[in-house]
Image: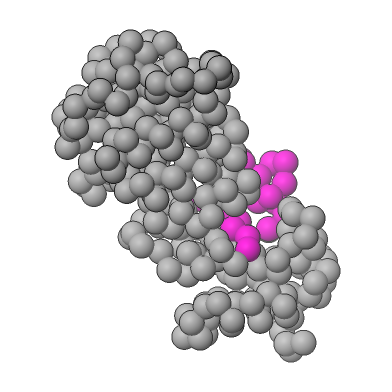
Amino acid sequence: MPNNQITSLHSPHVERVKALLGSRGKKIRATEKEFIADGIQSVREVLAPSFDAAPTLIALYVTEKGFEKLEQEIPSDIVASAPIVHVSDEVMTAMADTESPQGILALCKFTEITLYKIKQRQAKKIAYFWEIQDPGNSGTVIRTAEALGFDAVVFSTNSVDAYSPKTVRATVGALWHIPVVQGVGLEELMEFAEANEFFTIALAGDGSGSILDLPKNDKSILIFGNEARGLPEISGVKARVAIPMTGRSESLNVASAAAIAMFEVGIR
């Protein structure tokens, strides 16, 4: 056991982490600009971000087994420079929001990313999600956008918190490799698109054409709707299209639809 291991369940560290993961976590995360990432897969990316505005690491809480896992999977020089805080198994259990914690929790700090910052980065492929509600879906679309070469993910107002525990877990570390913008209304998005010459594509079940028939554009914004309500009519959108389906299903899960559309627009 390390001499400096935290063993008290009343430690301020425990309270800080629990507050970010608890029922009031969304408000606290928004105010403090802090959030939690758990598990070795996420922490591997926490320790190796790939863009300048990526979330930064404040503290890395590890149990003895968690520290052994770190040493096995992360280069020793990176581990040595990380702000590691050793905790007991009991403290980790009290901190974590999963039934079987891996013994590794990262306390991270994020900065607000705006459309202006996206413009500065010369983004060409953007995925926008209107009032997406499911944290699993939101994390998956962030992961997919990063994997398929998109430059940013943008969430509308009234969308799920991108830094909620379930969303962060579902990104599997992609948060450290693609900018995420929150709180952008449709009107603001369309003004941004018009001013910066983006071709806007709304994906909707009632779309009048197929995404397969769209011309290739150097700069595109894909727009996806709410899981239950889809997308409203959008003034000024260049194309409102659907994904062609030959089966009996009437619709696709938003994360599945996003994967297909982002592949079509971003890679093919």
76 relative to 239 in the view: left or right: right
Res. 68 image quadrant = bottom right
> Where residue 225 sits: x, y (%)?
46, 23
Quadrant showing the N terminus: bottom right
Query: Is residue 147 inside the magenta stretch?
Result: no
x 37%, y 26%: residue: 223
Res. 23 image quadrant = top right
- Residue furthest out toward the front: 246
> Where residue 147 sits: x, y (%)?
39, 50
Work out whether residue 32 can be spotted. Answer: no
Q: Nearer the viewer, residue 111 or 127?
A: 127
Residue 106, above or below 110: below
162 relative to 8 in the view: left or right: left
26 relative to 263 in the view: left or right: right
Work out whether residue 173 can be spotted. Answer: yes
Q: Nearer the viewer, residue 199 or 12?
A: 199
x 47%, y 85%: residue: 77
Magenta stretch bounds: 17-39
Quadrant showing the C terminus: top left
x 57%, y 48%: residue: 170
> Where residue 25 sits: x, y (%)?
66, 45
Q: Nearer the viewer, residue 97 or 39?
A: 39
Residue 144, above or below 105: above
